[in-house]
Amino acid sequence: MKLLIAIVQDKDANRLSNEFIDHDIRATRLSTTGGFLKSGNTTYMIGLEDERVDEVLEMIKTASHTRQQFMTPPVNLDAQLDSTSAYPVEVQVGGATVFVLPVDQFHQF
């Protein structure tokens, strides 16, 4: 048995939830916030048999897309640094981060 912890961008979460429902994958959905852009994420905790791990990883990969987004860096008060750092920069966001962990025991009450 494995525990998958999948962190996806909120924009992809509903599509992924529908995939889980269609394929009878039970997942706990948590609202989380990313550290870098402080944007909304959704974290799924999924317990499943070893044989289904690749199937679920493929669902996550298909539903979670990377995209480009502009962000404004924090204001720097150091006058010696280049003043161009205040302009928005394009960064890649989205996709998914997935952790696959072994599970010694699983109980449902």
Image (spheres, helix red, strand yellow):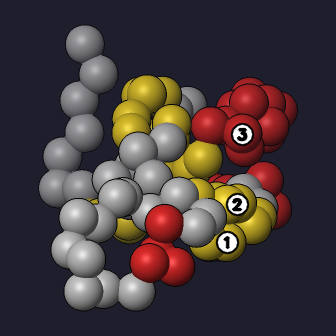
- Amino acid under label 1? Glu
Q: Give the image quarter of residue 30.
A: top left
Q: Position of residue 66 (x, y in %)?
A: 73, 66
Res 106 visible: yes
Which badge, 1 or 2, comes first in the chain's sequence?
Answer: 2
Q: Which mark is residue 90?
A: 1
Label 3 secondary element:
helix
At 39% from the left and 35% from the top, the residue drawn is 32
Quarter of the picture holding the C terminus: top left
27 left or right, relative to 55 = left
**Dot 3 surroundings within 10 Å: few (below 14), some, or many (20 or more)?**
some
At 74% from the left and 30% from the top, the residue drawn is 14
108 left or right, relative to 10 = left
Using the numbered discs, state the Cα–Cα distance from disc 1 to disc 3 in whole angstroms: 18 Å
- Amino acid under label 2? Gln
Using the numbered discs, state the Cα–Cα distance from disc 2 to disc 3 in whole angstroms: 13 Å
Label 1 secondary element:
strand
Using the numbered discs, state the Cα–Cα distance from disc 1 to disc 2 in whole angstroms: 5 Å
Which badge, 1 or 3, comes first in the chain's sequence?
Answer: 3
79 left or right, relative to 34 = left
Label 2 secondary element:
strand
**Pointer 2: what residue?**
69
Res 61 visible: no
**Dot 2 surroundings within 10 Å: few (below 14), some, or many (20 or more)?**
few
